[in-house]
Image: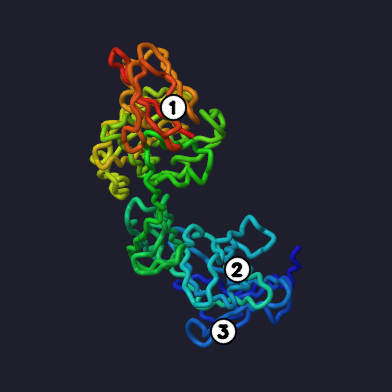
Amino acid sequence: MLALICLSINMKANVTTFPWNEGFEDEATFGDWTVVHTEGSDATAWARATTYQTQPNTGDYMVRSAGSAAYERNDLVSPAIDLEAGNRYVLRFHTYTAYPDDYMHSGLVLHLDEYDPANTANAHEIWVENAPADSWRILIIDISAYAGHTVYLDFQKWSENGHGWCLDDISIEETELQYYSIAGEVQPYFGGNVIGYGDYIEGTAVNLIAEGRNGYSFQRWSDGITQNPRTIIVTNNMTISAQFIDTYEYPEIDTVGMYNEYNQDFELVSDFDKLRRVTFSSEPTNCAWQHYSGDDEIPAHGGYFCAYSDECHNSPETMNALIIGPLYLETYCGCQNWHQLVFNSLTHGDWSSYDDDVYISTNPSIEDLIEPSSWEEQWTSLNVGYGGDYCYDEIVVDINDFTFKDNVVYIAFMKSGRCGWAIDDINIRCVFKDDVEENIIADLEFFPNPANDFVNVTGENLEYLKVYNTVGQLVMNVNLADENKIDVTNLEGGVYFFSIIDKKGNKVVKKVVRK
């Protein structure tokens, strides 16, 4: 309970003429205000002052409430002010915080019709000091909503130690409110967004916050200031743009060849964070691709998968891409390998209603890849399925036709809202072209594999075997009609490709590891 020592208000004539100003220059005028101290000594209550840490905003005097060693609160209450109904009123005052590091709390409470601290229903806190500073600044507050009432301005200060609060030139005027606009651009426009742009009453303190999107960090404002967030006092129309820089750590090119493949199973957050996620709209981040453990769905494999939230199903314009790459689709022996994209897909709802897809691009410039205006020019739809409703299906699509530009490709899972989409176990694998021929040699087996000394090759109507190393050199030629136990002791440890041809001309290539 706060023990109020003084509650009386010096009831002189109410303020009825505007503009009204209190500069605290006349000691008698200060008597129209009332100091209410709840704890502490009178020495730390509100008082007229000349200099302390700073000169008054104007004139020779201001009012100040100093800090003390003990916690205390002091109120400075204005005389009664009659606001006529139907008019618009603006309150202005200058504020200064001494020793802002010791700041505890200060604010302005407006009491309606009577000053009674016990009547909290008629007390409205219309301003709180959120950014104390050791310099004078002006605040402008629209109090038109209280027209038709008698009001009391109650400047409340809590403090201890060295914190002091100074006020000067408090005024109320009838006015047509002046609104100004704070606007700007984001450069590049897909690099992030700014919170705080809009229209404000003159004198409003606005916080601008620049937020970078995945792979981008705020660098500076267009006026050169690097502080973020930053506070601006609105005095005119302003254009302040935010500039972002690309801080994405581009991955090394993954090689997908005869004996390796790309795999992303989303089990580790660190691996997921390496992927490029691009948002083409300002929708909430919960609409973007996420590393997800699952509630209603069970991952296709492991404990995590990648999900696009279906909370944004009513925002079809929300477009988000999950980009994998760059990937180098390696060739073998001068012949094109057969590459396949394989992934597990689950949809929330009827997948036939989807218009989202998986895309591929052979443009190695990441900046071009994420440029929405050139998306259709840079990316090609693979026209794949989406998977079953609420259950994972394996999707397999050949991507062999997209290896023509330095064999470097990017894969993008593009989601544009509506229903949710979850994917898991993305693989991009290489299969030698002969492995996908319709003519398969019956009962063909290789064992053991890996091998130490010998590899047994069995099957129907086998004719001969050719063995290649990883650079395409022929290192062994065997007539299988005479021998099917292949001596590999003369081969160095590593990966080899066994090309078998039967008497009908069917050919199959298998990978064998020599220990």
**Label annotation for residue 451:** none
Disc on res. 106: 2
Assess disc 2: are there few (<14), some (14-19) or many (≥20) residues with their C-alpha within 10 Å of its C-alpha. many
Closer to us: 370 or 286: 370
Query: Where 71 sits versus 508, above or below?
Result: below
Relative to 280, say whether 80 is above or below: below
The amino acid sitting under disc 1 is Asp
User: What is the quadrant of the N terminus in the image?
Assistant: bottom right
- Please tell me which of labels 3 and 2 falls first in the chain: 3
Which of the two residues, 261 or 357, is positioned nearer the viewer here?
Answer: 261
Residue drawn where x is 49% and y is 24% of the image: 448
The local crowd at label 3, few if under 14, some if 14 to 19, many if 20 or more residues have their Cα within 10 Å, is some
Q: Residue placed at 57% from the left, 63% from the top?
A: 110
Q: Secondary structure at mark 3?
A: loop
Which dot marks residue 53? 3
Amino acid carrying mark 3 in the image = Gln
